[in-house]
Each structure stands twice: as C-alpha cells, then as structure tokens.
Image: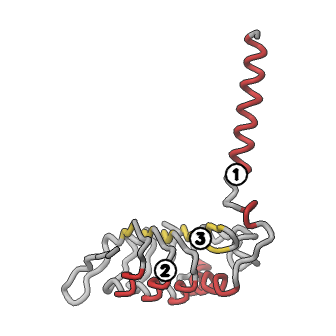
Amino acid sequence: MTNVTIQKMTRYLTGALILATLIIGTDELAITAGIEVPPEERAALVALYNAAGGSGWTSSTNWNNGDPCLNNWYGIVCSGGHIAGIQLQNNNLVGKIPPAIGDLSQLTTFWVYGNVFLGGTIPKQFGNLSQLQSIHMGFCNLSGYLPPEFGNLSLLTQLNLYTIQKQSGLEIIPVISQ
C-alpha cells in the first residue's frame, strides 16, 4: 500500500468513528425514540421547574415543552422512557426542591451543585428513589438534616452535600448504611 492509500483509509476510518460517536452520544434519544415519559415523572420535573424558579434559570431549553426525553429538556438524561438523571449544576436554581422529586422512580443521578435553594431542606421523598446512585448538592445553601429516609437508598455510592448550613448548632453529618 502506498502512503496516499493509507492516508485515505485513515481519514475514512476516523470519519466513521466520529459519525458513530455522534450517533451513540445523543443522550439515548435513539433508545427512547417514540417512548413518552410517564405523566408522574413529567409532573415531577414541572414541579421542580416551578419550585426552583425555572423561568430564571441560566438554561432551560425546551423545559415544559412536550415530553422531557423526546424534546431533549436541558439537563435531563433519559433511559428507556424514564428520567434517569437531572444535571442542572450551576444553573441558577432558586427556591426549594419539591417533594414531587420522589416520583422519579428511575432516577440514578441528581446533580444540582452550585445553585442557591434559599435555605430549603432536602425532602424526605428522596428516600423513594430506590435507583439513585449519585447525589451532588454542594454549595446549594440547603439546611436541616438528612431525612432518615435516606437509609432506603441502598444503591447510593456518591453523596456530596458540602457547605450545608447548620441547624440548632449541629452540623449535618451524612451517614449512609448499606
């Protein structure tokens, strides 16, 4: 083979690899195409939007527009027609995390660090999220204690709550039992 032939083959293979990466990396739209999110999951996201000042978020692309997965709502990760992740870090969320968050039965990641929740607490409904593996809520100005229901999160492997405010002179010390 000549150098020209090798260069052409390399360009072709590189192009094919880039195309495959683009197709696979589309937030699982190919997997969820045509599958709508259950109404209670959409309602939970709308409750988050309303309770956390969605109209003032840095980015809220496509929020409240049809189906969260089919319409690719900003910061939402979908898998198999369910909400699998919320990734709204550093996005100017204010207000409170609504109890409806507990209706996201397939949620595995909840990343909202770097937002100001105006001293809100962590809802006990987080204990309903049996698939939850990763929580990042640092620098969110949250207060209070970890609800005992957090003990239900047997798959939780990451819990970052740094800089949570003190209540009654006691600092929150997260304890997760497995």
* Residue for point 52% across, 85% down: 102
Disc 2 packing (10 Å; few <14; some 14–19; many ≥20) = many
> Which one is in front, 58 or 20?
20
Left or right: 45 in relation to 170: right
The scheme the figure's colours follow is: secondary structure
For marks 3 and 1, the one nearer the N-term is 1
Give residue 83's position: percent from left, percent from top: 62, 74
Query: Pointer 3: what residue?
Result: 84
Query: Pointer 1: what residue?
Result: 24
Please tell me in which quadrant of the rendered image residue 63 appears: bottom right
Query: Pointer 2: what residue?
Result: 94
- The residue lying furthest to the right in this view is 34
* Residue for point 62% across, 79% down: 55
Please tell me in which quadrant of the rendered image residue 30 appears: bottom right
* Residue for point 70% across, 78% down: 37
What's the residue type where badge 1 is placed? Ile
